[in-house]
Image (cartoon, rainbow, N blue to C red):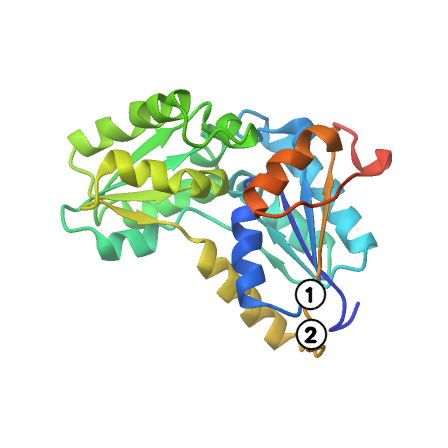
């Protein structure tokens, strides 16, 4: 591992591409490795132990590919596995959590809403966020079953996506929320639809840019920023069927990409 080594990013599926996009904007010369654990998506309905095991396996793969840093581009995986990953691997590891603190600074109604998976909302990490900020503002939590699957299918604008999103968003507005936190990286791809449903007066808080900023801080502090002025590359892997995953990755990445199958030893469910 050195400054010329790649950065590894993983998620339960394609949602982490929203973070990959921010990382690419911030690091033009870095090589990026992305893993979509599509055989086991979504993580939100899996046990913490299962998500932790998958996170360890994928991190092992990325470290074996000489990754100099790992970005856990999944709120559920961060909540379930970040402590274990940092104890087992020596590379810098950056996680993500619902951006409650920035939302508290934005709200005028003193009511904020969190859209997330059930796995994220039931995690100890999220419980600490609630304990820290719940006395400052009212925090409404909304598990959003089915939204991850919409993004995994690349269905971001159709009637089903609209009806499902409205089902989750409109009741929060009726309860006074003026700020909506996207607590799942998949939901970043639904942000235009959420804004259309909620209206321009509602603030939408997405933490992805902050993750790129934290990654820069960690790389700089470890003297790991790439010295190479050339344009960086992206490589994509999945634990699922590459032919099924490739069209959606290409759609969301806005480019035709190659998606490779993870080696079998990194695809075990336990």
Q: Secondary structure at mark 2?
A: loop
Which of 35/89 is in front? 35
- In this view, the residue farthest toward the front is 256
| Residue 16 visible in the shown view | no
Q: Is residue 4 left or right of residue 201?
A: right
The first of marks 2 and 1 along the sequence is 2
- Residue 216, quarter of picture: bottom right
Q: Is residue 16 above or below residue 94?
A: above
Q: Is residue 241 above or below residue 266?
A: above
Categorize mark 2 by other alpha carbons within 10 Å: few (<14), some (14-19), many (20+).
many
**Residue that badge 2 annotates:** 226
Q: Which mark is residue 50?
A: none
Residue 267 spot, x, y in % from top left: 78, 33
Measure the alpha-carbon separation of dots 2 and 1. Answer: 10 Å
Q: Are marks 2 and 1 in contact (CB under 8 Å)?
A: yes
Residue 98 spot, x, y in % from top left: 41, 46
Residue 126 spot, x, y in % from top left: 42, 42
**Residue that badge 1 annotates:** 232
- Residue 1, quarter of picture: bottom right
Residue 60 spot, x, y in % from top left: 78, 48
- Residue 91, quarter of picture: bottom right
Q: Residue at x 66, y 47 (%)?
A: 84
Q: Residue at x 54, y 67 (%)?
A: 26
Q: Secondary structure at mark 1?
A: loop
Q: Which numbered mark, 2 or 1, is in the foreground of this view?
A: 1
Q: Residue at x 53, y 31 (%)?
A: 154
């Amino acid at each position: 591992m050195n400054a010329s080594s790649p950065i590894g990013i993983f998620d339960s599926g394609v949602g982490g591409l929203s973070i990959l996009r921010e990382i690419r904007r911030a690091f033009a010369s870095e090589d990026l490795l992305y893993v979509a654990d599509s055989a086991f998506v979504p993580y939100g309905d899996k046990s913490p132990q299962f998500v932790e095991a998958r996170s360890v396996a994928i991190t092992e793969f990325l470290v074996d590919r000489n990754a100099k840093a790992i970005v856990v581009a999944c709120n559920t995986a961060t909540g379930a596995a970040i402590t274990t990953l940092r104890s087992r691997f020596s590379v810098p590891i950056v996680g993500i959590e619902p951006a409650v603190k920035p939302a508290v600074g934005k709200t005028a109604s003193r009511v904020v809403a969190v859209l997330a998976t059930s796995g994220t909302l039931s995690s100890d990490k999220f419980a600490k966020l609630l304990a820290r900020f719940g006395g400052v503002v009212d925090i409404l939590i909304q598990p959003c079953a089915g939204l991850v699957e919409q993004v995994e299918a690349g269905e971001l604008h159709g009637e089903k996506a609209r009806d499902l999103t409205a089902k989750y968003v409109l009741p929060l507005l009726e309860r006074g929320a003026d700020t909506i936190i996207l607590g799942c990286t998949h939901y970043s791809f639904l942000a235009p639809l959420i804004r259309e449903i909620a209206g321009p007066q509602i603030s939408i808080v997405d933490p992805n840019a902050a993750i790129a900023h934290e990654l820069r801080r960690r790389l700089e502090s470890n003297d790991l920023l790439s010295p190479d002025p050339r344009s960086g590359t992206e490589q994509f892997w999945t634990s699922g069927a590459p032919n099924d995953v490739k069209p959606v990755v290409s759609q969301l990445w806005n480019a035709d990409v190659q998606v490779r199958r993870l080696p079998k030893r990194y695809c075990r469910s336990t």
